[in-house]
Image: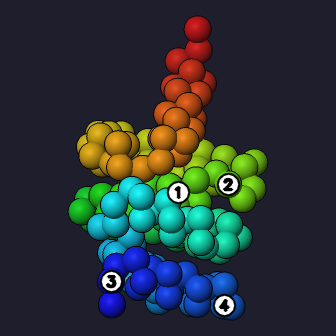
Amino acid sequence: MKKYEICRKYLEGLESNIRIWGSVVDIILSNYKLLPPSKKAELAAETSKVVRFNLMSQYLEHFGRIFYDVTLEEKRALIENSIYLISLDNFEYDYRETILRVTRFLERAKSHELLFESVWSCLKDQIPEHTAKEIRRLRHEQRAIINPG
């Protein structure tokens, strides 16, 4: 089965039961990461916005629960996976809620700024421009809060 079909199959499964996200997210991500941008866009267009948002939300909550307790390599993978799932959601379902969740993710990731920068520099050109723009904007706002004026 091709990577696109594997992603589609598991995302469709989440439509009927989001509670299984933890058992399928690694399969989805390992295949999604390897898709060309056009196939990622096609997958997003064919997948329910609710499913994409819920998967991203569940993963970002998972990120928040374990981020401070894992190794550096696991942190790197968590950051990378989070960025990919944010790009799959692409701020399309519930903009306000996505902003809140992504802001919380960025606040937590800020504790390892150099690691985040390393991952971000590799991924920022591989995700939809809209997602990259929103993440850059939110990071800029965070910096402005820390360093006003």
> The C terminus lies in which quarter of the figure?
top right
In the image: residue 43, left or right of residue 48: left
Residue behind mark 2 = 92
Dot 1 and dot 4 residues touching (CB under 8 Å): no
**Element at label 3:** loop
Q: Which amino acid does label 4 sit on?
A: Asn
> Marks 1/3: CA distance?
23 Å
Q: How many tags in the picture?
A: 4
Residue at the image point whose x is 60% and y is 45% from the top? 103
- Residue 114 placement (x, y as % from top left): 29, 39
- Residue 105 placement (x, y as % from top left): 53, 52
Can I make out residue 139 in this image? no
> The N terminus lies in which quarter of the figure?
bottom left
> Marks 2/1: CA distance?
10 Å
Disc 3 or 2, which lies upstream in sequence?
A: 3
Residue behind mark 1 = 86
> Marks 2/4: CA distance?
21 Å
> Marks 4/3: CA distance?
23 Å
Tell which of 73 and 95 is nearer to you: 95
